[in-house]
Image (spheres, rainbow, N blue to C red):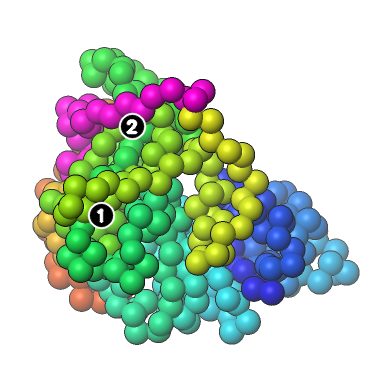
Amino acid sequence: MRQVTLLGATGSIGLNTLDVLARHPDRFAVHALTANRQVDPMIRLCFEHKPRYAVMADPDAARELAERLPAGLGVTVLSGCEGLEQVASAETVDVVMAAIVGGAGLRPTLAAARAGKRVLLANKEALVMSGALFMDAVAESGAELLPIDSEHNAIFQCLPPDHIRDPDGAGVRRILLTASGGPFRETPVASLASVTPEQACAHPNWSMGQKISVDSATLMNKGLELIEACWLFNTGPGRIDVHVHPESIIHSMVEYLDGSILAQLGSPDMRTPIANGLAWPERIDAGVGSLDLFELGRFRFERPDEDRFPCLTLAADAFRLGGTAPVVLNAANEVAVRAFLNGHLKFTDIPVIIEKALERQAPVAAESFEVIFEQDAQARQLAWSIVEAQA
Protein backbone atom coordinates (compact mmCIF):
# COMPACT_ATOMS: atom_id res chain seq x y z
CA MET A 1 0.00 0.00 0.00
CA ARG A 2 1.69 3.21 -1.17
CA GLN A 3 0.92 6.43 0.70
CA VAL A 4 0.25 9.43 -1.55
CA THR A 5 0.36 13.15 -0.83
CA LEU A 6 -1.50 15.23 -3.38
CA LEU A 7 -0.32 18.84 -3.69
CA GLY A 8 -3.14 20.73 -5.40
CA ALA A 9 -6.03 18.35 -4.78
CA THR A 10 -8.90 20.58 -5.95
CA GLY A 11 -7.48 21.37 -9.39
CA SER A 12 -7.90 19.40 -12.59
CA ILE A 13 -4.78 17.25 -12.09
CA GLY A 14 -5.68 16.67 -8.45
CA LEU A 15 -9.19 15.48 -9.19
CA ASN A 16 -7.98 13.22 -12.00
CA THR A 17 -5.36 11.76 -9.67
CA LEU A 18 -7.99 11.02 -7.04
CA ASP A 19 -10.09 9.31 -9.71
CA VAL A 20 -7.19 6.99 -10.57
CA LEU A 21 -6.35 6.34 -6.90
CA ALA A 22 -9.96 5.43 -6.15
CA ARG A 23 -9.80 2.71 -8.81
CA HIS A 24 -6.97 0.99 -6.93
CA PRO A 25 -7.76 1.04 -3.19
CA ASP A 26 -5.65 -2.09 -2.75
CA ARG A 27 -2.52 -0.28 -3.99
CA PHE A 28 -2.78 3.36 -2.88
CA ALA A 29 -3.95 5.31 0.16
CA VAL A 30 -4.27 9.09 0.48
CA HIS A 31 -1.95 10.50 3.15
CA ALA A 32 -2.63 14.20 2.56
CA LEU A 33 -4.65 16.53 0.36
CA THR A 34 -3.72 20.18 -0.10
CA ALA A 35 -5.39 23.23 -1.60
CA ASN A 36 -5.05 26.99 -1.57
CA ARG A 37 -8.32 28.33 -0.16
CA GLN A 38 -11.10 26.18 -1.65
CA VAL A 39 -12.75 25.03 1.58
CA ASP A 40 -16.01 23.54 0.26
CA PRO A 41 -14.33 21.29 -2.34
CA MET A 42 -11.75 20.22 0.26
CA ILE A 43 -14.48 19.22 2.70
CA ARG A 44 -16.07 16.99 0.06
CA LEU A 45 -12.70 15.42 -0.77
CA CYS A 46 -11.91 14.77 2.90
CA PHE A 47 -15.19 12.92 3.38
CA GLU A 48 -14.66 10.92 0.21
CA HIS A 49 -10.95 10.03 0.50
CA LYS A 50 -10.33 10.30 4.27
CA PRO A 51 -6.75 11.62 4.26
CA ARG A 52 -4.74 11.82 7.48
CA TYR A 53 -3.95 15.47 6.74
CA ALA A 54 -5.60 18.33 4.90
CA VAL A 55 -3.50 21.42 4.23
CA MET A 56 -4.73 24.84 3.17
CA ALA A 57 -2.08 27.28 1.98
CA ASP A 58 -4.28 30.16 3.16
CA PRO A 59 -4.38 30.31 7.01
CA ASP A 60 -7.93 31.71 7.13
CA ALA A 61 -9.13 28.86 4.92
CA ALA A 62 -7.35 26.38 7.18
CA ARG A 63 -9.14 27.73 10.24
CA GLU A 64 -12.49 27.47 8.49
CA LEU A 65 -11.74 23.93 7.34
CA ALA A 66 -10.74 22.87 10.86
CA GLU A 67 -13.97 24.29 12.27
CA ARG A 68 -16.19 22.59 9.69
CA LEU A 69 -14.62 19.13 9.57
CA PRO A 70 -16.05 16.78 12.24
CA ALA A 71 -13.48 15.54 14.74
CA GLY A 72 -14.60 11.98 14.17
CA LEU A 73 -13.35 12.07 10.57
CA GLY A 74 -9.78 11.93 11.87
CA VAL A 75 -8.34 14.56 9.55
CA THR A 76 -5.64 16.86 10.94
CA VAL A 77 -5.69 20.33 9.35
CA LEU A 78 -2.41 22.18 8.68
CA SER A 79 -1.74 25.51 7.00
CA GLY A 80 0.76 27.56 5.05
CA CYS A 81 3.97 26.63 3.31
CA GLU A 82 5.21 24.79 6.40
CA GLY A 83 2.18 22.51 6.29
CA LEU A 84 2.66 21.86 2.58
CA GLU A 85 6.32 20.98 3.08
CA GLN A 86 5.49 18.75 6.06
CA VAL A 87 3.07 16.52 4.14
CA ALA A 88 5.32 16.48 1.07
CA SER A 89 8.31 15.20 3.02
CA ALA A 90 6.65 13.03 5.69
CA GLU A 91 8.53 9.82 6.35
CA THR A 92 5.48 7.63 5.74
CA VAL A 93 4.80 9.13 2.29
CA ASP A 94 5.92 7.21 -0.79
CA VAL A 95 4.53 9.29 -3.66
CA VAL A 96 3.94 13.03 -4.02
CA MET A 97 1.81 14.39 -6.85
CA ALA A 98 3.11 17.93 -7.44
CA ALA A 99 0.11 19.65 -9.03
CA ILE A 100 0.14 23.14 -7.51
CA VAL A 101 0.00 25.63 -10.38
CA GLY A 102 2.71 28.27 -10.72
CA GLY A 103 5.75 29.26 -8.70
CA ALA A 104 3.88 28.56 -5.46
CA GLY A 105 4.46 24.86 -6.07
CA LEU A 106 8.26 25.03 -5.97
CA ARG A 107 8.87 24.89 -2.21
CA PRO A 108 6.72 21.84 -1.37
CA THR A 109 7.83 20.03 -4.54
CA LEU A 110 11.45 20.69 -3.56
CA ALA A 111 10.72 19.36 -0.06
CA ALA A 112 9.44 16.12 -1.60
CA ALA A 113 12.51 15.82 -3.82
CA ARG A 114 14.91 16.45 -0.94
CA ALA A 115 13.11 13.77 1.09
CA GLY A 116 13.73 11.19 -1.64
CA LYS A 117 10.11 10.64 -2.66
CA ARG A 118 8.70 9.51 -5.97
CA VAL A 119 7.75 12.94 -7.29
CA LEU A 120 5.09 13.01 -9.99
CA LEU A 121 5.82 16.36 -11.57
CA ALA A 122 2.77 18.16 -12.92
CA ASN A 123 4.11 21.56 -11.81
CA LYS A 124 6.35 22.65 -14.68
CA GLU A 125 7.33 25.91 -12.97
CA ALA A 126 9.52 24.07 -10.44
CA LEU A 127 11.99 23.13 -13.17
CA VAL A 128 11.52 26.36 -15.12
CA MET A 129 12.52 28.39 -12.06
CA SER A 130 15.26 26.21 -10.58
CA GLY A 131 16.23 23.61 -13.18
CA ALA A 132 19.84 22.75 -12.30
CA LEU A 133 19.38 23.16 -8.55
CA PHE A 134 16.21 21.07 -8.54
CA MET A 135 17.78 18.27 -10.60
CA ASP A 136 20.79 18.31 -8.23
CA ALA A 137 18.43 17.91 -5.26
CA VAL A 138 16.79 14.92 -6.95
CA ALA A 139 20.16 13.30 -7.64
CA GLU A 140 21.49 13.91 -4.13
CA SER A 141 18.46 12.42 -2.37
CA GLY A 142 17.84 9.53 -4.74
CA ALA A 143 14.30 10.73 -5.44
CA GLU A 144 12.40 9.45 -8.47
CA LEU A 145 11.24 12.27 -10.75
CA LEU A 146 8.51 11.18 -13.17
CA PRO A 147 6.94 13.71 -15.56
CA ILE A 148 3.15 13.95 -15.62
CA ASP A 149 2.57 16.65 -18.25
CA SER A 150 1.20 14.61 -21.13
CA GLU A 151 4.00 15.71 -23.46
CA HIS A 152 6.87 14.97 -21.09
CA ASN A 153 5.30 11.72 -20.00
CA ALA A 154 5.07 10.75 -23.68
CA ILE A 155 8.78 11.51 -24.19
CA PHE A 156 9.58 9.55 -21.02
CA GLN A 157 7.70 6.55 -22.40
CA CYS A 158 9.51 6.80 -25.76
CA LEU A 159 13.01 6.81 -24.25
CA PRO A 160 14.97 3.77 -23.01
CA PRO A 161 14.48 3.59 -19.21
CA ASP A 162 18.24 3.60 -18.58
CA HIS A 163 18.87 6.62 -20.84
CA ILE A 164 16.19 9.10 -19.73
CA ARG A 165 18.82 11.83 -19.20
CA ASP A 166 21.34 10.59 -21.74
CA PRO A 167 20.10 11.49 -25.24
CA ASP A 168 23.49 10.81 -26.81
CA GLY A 169 23.74 7.38 -25.23
CA ALA A 170 20.19 6.61 -26.34
CA GLY A 171 20.94 7.63 -29.93
CA VAL A 172 18.38 10.46 -29.90
CA ARG A 173 18.46 12.87 -32.81
CA ARG A 174 15.67 15.17 -31.64
CA ILE A 175 12.56 15.42 -29.50
CA LEU A 176 9.29 16.39 -31.18
CA LEU A 177 7.21 18.26 -28.60
CA THR A 178 3.59 18.54 -29.64
CA ALA A 179 1.19 21.43 -28.98
CA SER A 180 -2.54 21.65 -29.63
CA GLY A 181 -2.31 25.24 -30.83
CA GLY A 182 -5.00 26.28 -28.35
CA PRO A 183 -8.26 28.05 -29.17
CA PHE A 184 -6.70 30.76 -31.37
CA ARG A 185 -4.68 28.60 -33.76
CA GLU A 186 -6.65 29.94 -36.75
CA THR A 187 -7.87 33.26 -35.37
CA PRO A 188 -6.62 36.23 -37.42
CA VAL A 189 -3.70 37.81 -35.56
CA ALA A 190 -5.38 41.23 -35.87
CA SER A 191 -8.35 39.92 -33.86
CA LEU A 192 -6.36 38.58 -30.89
CA ALA A 193 -6.32 41.91 -29.06
CA SER A 194 -10.06 41.70 -28.50
CA VAL A 195 -10.39 38.11 -27.26
CA THR A 196 -11.91 37.62 -23.81
CA PRO A 197 -10.72 35.52 -20.86
CA GLU A 198 -13.68 33.22 -21.45
CA GLN A 199 -12.58 32.62 -25.03
CA ALA A 200 -8.96 32.08 -23.97
CA CYS A 201 -10.01 29.49 -21.38
CA ALA A 202 -12.15 27.51 -23.84
CA HIS A 203 -9.53 24.94 -24.86
CA PRO A 204 -10.66 22.80 -27.79
CA ASN A 205 -9.31 19.49 -26.43
CA TRP A 206 -8.31 19.62 -22.76
CA SER A 207 -10.18 20.48 -19.57
CA MET A 208 -7.75 22.61 -17.52
CA GLY A 209 -7.64 25.45 -15.02
CA GLN A 210 -7.76 29.09 -16.08
CA LYS A 211 -4.05 29.87 -15.82
CA ILE A 212 -2.92 26.83 -17.81
CA SER A 213 -5.66 27.41 -20.37
CA VAL A 214 -4.47 30.96 -21.01
CA ASP A 215 -0.88 29.70 -21.23
CA SER A 216 -2.03 27.22 -23.84
CA ALA A 217 -3.74 30.00 -25.78
CA THR A 218 -0.54 32.10 -25.84
CA LEU A 219 1.66 28.98 -26.31
CA MET A 220 3.60 30.02 -23.19
CA ASN A 221 2.57 26.63 -21.84
CA LYS A 222 4.66 25.08 -24.61
CA GLY A 223 7.48 27.51 -23.90
CA LEU A 224 7.54 26.44 -20.24
CA GLU A 225 7.36 22.81 -21.34
CA LEU A 226 10.29 23.38 -23.68
CA ILE A 227 12.40 24.57 -20.73
CA GLU A 228 11.13 21.71 -18.55
CA ALA A 229 12.00 19.16 -21.24
CA CYS A 230 15.55 20.51 -21.45
CA TRP A 231 16.06 19.83 -17.74
CA LEU A 232 14.19 16.54 -17.57
CA PHE A 233 15.98 14.98 -20.53
CA ASN A 234 19.33 16.79 -20.28
CA THR A 235 19.21 18.52 -23.65
CA GLY A 236 18.78 21.98 -25.18
CA PRO A 237 16.23 23.87 -27.31
CA GLY A 238 18.22 23.10 -30.46
CA ARG A 239 17.31 19.44 -30.08
CA ILE A 240 13.60 20.05 -29.50
CA ASP A 241 11.14 20.87 -32.28
CA VAL A 242 7.64 22.07 -31.40
CA HIS A 243 4.94 20.62 -33.66
CA VAL A 244 1.40 21.99 -33.52
CA HIS A 245 -0.86 18.94 -33.59
CA PRO A 246 -4.52 20.05 -33.35
CA GLU A 247 -5.93 16.60 -32.58
CA SER A 248 -3.91 16.24 -29.32
CA ILE A 249 -3.66 12.48 -29.82
CA ILE A 250 0.09 12.16 -30.37
CA HIS A 251 1.40 13.59 -27.13
CA SER A 252 5.05 13.80 -28.24
CA MET A 253 7.68 11.86 -30.17
CA VAL A 254 11.36 10.96 -30.09
CA GLU A 255 13.42 10.63 -33.27
CA TYR A 256 16.49 8.38 -33.24
CA LEU A 257 19.67 8.45 -35.32
CA ASP A 258 18.52 5.53 -37.46
CA GLY A 259 15.48 7.50 -38.61
CA SER A 260 12.97 5.78 -36.32
CA ILE A 261 10.37 8.01 -34.64
CA LEU A 262 8.62 6.62 -31.56
CA ALA A 263 5.36 8.28 -30.56
CA GLN A 264 3.02 7.92 -27.59
CA LEU A 265 -0.65 8.19 -28.51
CA GLY A 266 -3.72 8.43 -26.35
CA SER A 267 -6.96 10.29 -25.77
CA PRO A 268 -6.53 13.80 -24.33
CA ASP A 269 -7.13 12.53 -20.79
CA MET A 270 -4.67 13.30 -17.98
CA ARG A 271 -5.52 10.08 -16.18
CA THR A 272 -3.25 8.21 -18.61
CA PRO A 273 0.04 9.93 -17.63
CA ILE A 274 -1.09 10.05 -13.99
CA ALA A 275 -1.61 6.28 -13.92
CA ASN A 276 1.71 5.79 -15.69
CA GLY A 277 3.53 7.79 -13.03
CA LEU A 278 1.75 6.16 -10.11
CA ALA A 279 2.42 2.58 -11.21
CA TRP A 280 5.66 2.85 -13.24
CA PRO A 281 7.23 0.58 -14.38
CA GLU A 282 3.92 -1.33 -14.22
CA ARG A 283 0.68 -0.44 -16.01
CA ILE A 284 -2.68 -0.02 -14.29
CA ASP A 285 -6.20 0.83 -15.39
CA ALA A 286 -6.69 4.60 -15.59
CA GLY A 287 -10.37 4.58 -16.49
CA VAL A 288 -9.55 5.77 -20.01
CA GLY A 289 -11.33 4.09 -22.92
CA SER A 290 -9.66 2.74 -26.04
CA LEU A 291 -8.69 5.22 -28.73
CA ASP A 292 -10.66 4.82 -31.99
CA LEU A 293 -8.16 5.64 -34.72
CA PHE A 294 -10.71 4.81 -37.42
CA GLU A 295 -13.01 7.50 -36.08
CA LEU A 296 -10.16 10.00 -35.86
CA GLY A 297 -9.09 9.36 -39.43
CA ARG A 298 -5.99 11.55 -39.73
CA PHE A 299 -3.32 13.55 -37.91
CA ARG A 300 -2.26 17.09 -38.78
CA PHE A 301 1.00 18.88 -37.99
CA GLU A 302 1.85 22.57 -38.39
CA ARG A 303 4.82 24.78 -37.59
CA PRO A 304 4.11 27.20 -34.74
CA ASP A 305 3.40 30.74 -35.95
CA GLU A 306 5.89 32.99 -34.13
CA ASP A 307 3.87 36.13 -34.94
CA ARG A 308 0.82 34.58 -33.32
CA PHE A 309 2.76 32.93 -30.47
CA PRO A 310 5.71 35.16 -29.44
CA CYS A 311 5.73 33.59 -25.96
CA LEU A 312 7.29 30.41 -27.36
CA THR A 313 10.29 32.37 -28.65
CA LEU A 314 10.55 34.33 -25.38
CA ALA A 315 10.77 31.08 -23.43
CA ALA A 316 13.45 29.57 -25.65
CA ASP A 317 15.47 32.80 -25.48
CA ALA A 318 15.18 32.88 -21.68
CA PHE A 319 16.54 29.35 -21.40
CA ARG A 320 19.47 30.16 -23.68
CA LEU A 321 20.17 33.34 -21.70
CA GLY A 322 20.39 31.21 -18.57
CA GLY A 323 20.78 32.19 -14.94
CA THR A 324 17.56 33.59 -13.50
CA ALA A 325 16.09 34.63 -16.86
CA PRO A 326 13.54 31.77 -16.76
CA VAL A 327 12.57 32.90 -13.25
CA VAL A 328 11.74 36.36 -14.60
CA LEU A 329 9.94 34.84 -17.59
CA ASN A 330 7.72 32.70 -15.38
CA ALA A 331 6.99 35.40 -12.80
CA ALA A 332 6.11 38.01 -15.43
CA ASN A 333 3.88 35.52 -17.22
CA GLU A 334 1.98 34.66 -14.03
CA VAL A 335 1.41 38.35 -13.31
CA ALA A 336 0.37 39.13 -16.89
CA VAL A 337 -2.03 36.18 -17.07
CA ARG A 338 -3.67 37.18 -13.79
CA ALA A 339 -4.02 40.75 -15.01
CA PHE A 340 -5.60 39.52 -18.25
CA LEU A 341 -8.04 37.25 -16.39
CA ASN A 342 -8.99 40.19 -14.14
CA GLY A 343 -9.68 42.41 -17.15
CA HIS A 344 -6.68 44.73 -16.72
CA LEU A 345 -4.80 43.70 -19.87
CA LYS A 346 -5.52 42.72 -23.44
CA PHE A 347 -4.60 39.20 -24.48
CA THR A 348 -1.89 40.55 -26.77
CA ASP A 349 -0.36 42.49 -23.87
CA ILE A 350 0.76 39.29 -22.14
CA PRO A 351 3.95 38.76 -24.21
CA VAL A 352 4.62 42.51 -24.10
CA ILE A 353 4.73 42.47 -20.29
CA ILE A 354 7.00 39.43 -20.29
CA GLU A 355 9.42 40.89 -22.84
CA LYS A 356 9.66 44.19 -20.95
CA ALA A 357 10.33 42.38 -17.67
CA LEU A 358 13.11 40.33 -19.29
CA GLU A 359 14.65 43.52 -20.68
CA ARG A 360 14.55 45.40 -17.36
CA GLN A 361 15.62 42.66 -14.91
CA ALA A 362 19.03 41.37 -15.94
CA PRO A 363 19.59 37.72 -15.05
CA VAL A 364 22.04 36.73 -12.33
CA ALA A 365 23.61 33.37 -11.60
CA ALA A 366 21.09 30.95 -10.08
CA GLU A 367 23.47 29.96 -7.31
CA SER A 368 20.92 29.07 -4.64
CA PHE A 369 17.21 28.74 -4.03
CA GLU A 370 17.39 31.93 -1.97
CA VAL A 371 18.56 33.82 -5.06
CA ILE A 372 15.76 32.26 -7.10
CA PHE A 373 13.08 33.26 -4.59
CA GLU A 374 14.50 36.81 -4.37
CA GLN A 375 14.57 37.18 -8.14
CA ASP A 376 11.05 35.77 -8.39
CA ALA A 377 9.71 38.33 -5.90
CA GLN A 378 11.51 41.20 -7.67
CA ALA A 379 10.24 40.08 -11.07
CA ARG A 380 6.66 39.98 -9.83
CA GLN A 381 6.92 43.52 -8.45
CA LEU A 382 8.48 44.70 -11.70
CA ALA A 383 5.82 42.99 -13.80
CA TRP A 384 2.99 44.54 -11.77
CA SER A 385 4.52 47.99 -12.28
CA ILE A 386 4.68 47.35 -16.03
CA VAL A 387 1.05 46.17 -16.01
CA GLU A 388 -0.04 49.33 -14.20
CA ALA A 389 1.79 51.48 -16.73
CA GLN A 390 0.30 49.46 -19.61
CA ALA A 391 -3.30 49.48 -18.35
Query: How far across and how far down the image is residue 134, in percent?
Result: 33, 72
Spatial CA span between label 1 and label 2? 19 Å
Q: Is residue 249 left or right of residue 72?
A: left
Q: From the image, which quarter does the N terminus lie in?
A: bottom right
Q: Amino acid at mark 2?
A: His
Where does label 1 land, which residue?
A: 227
Q: Which residues are magenta?
A: 294-314
Query: Is any atom of residue 77 visible in this view?
Result: no
Query: How far across and how far down the image is residue 175, in percent?
Result: 24, 50
At 39% from the left and 43% from the top, the residue drawn is 251
Where does label 2 land, which residue?
A: 245
Query: How far across and how far down the image is residue 384, in percent?
Result: 30, 46
Please tell me whether mark 1 sits on a helix, a strand or a loop.
helix
Sequence-first tag of 1 and 2: 1
Query: How far across and how far down the image is residue 146, in percent?
Result: 43, 64
Most common SS among magenta residues: loop
Q: Is residue 16 magenta?
A: no
Name the residue nearer the viewer: 295 or 80: 295
Q: Is residue 94 left or right of residue 191?
A: right
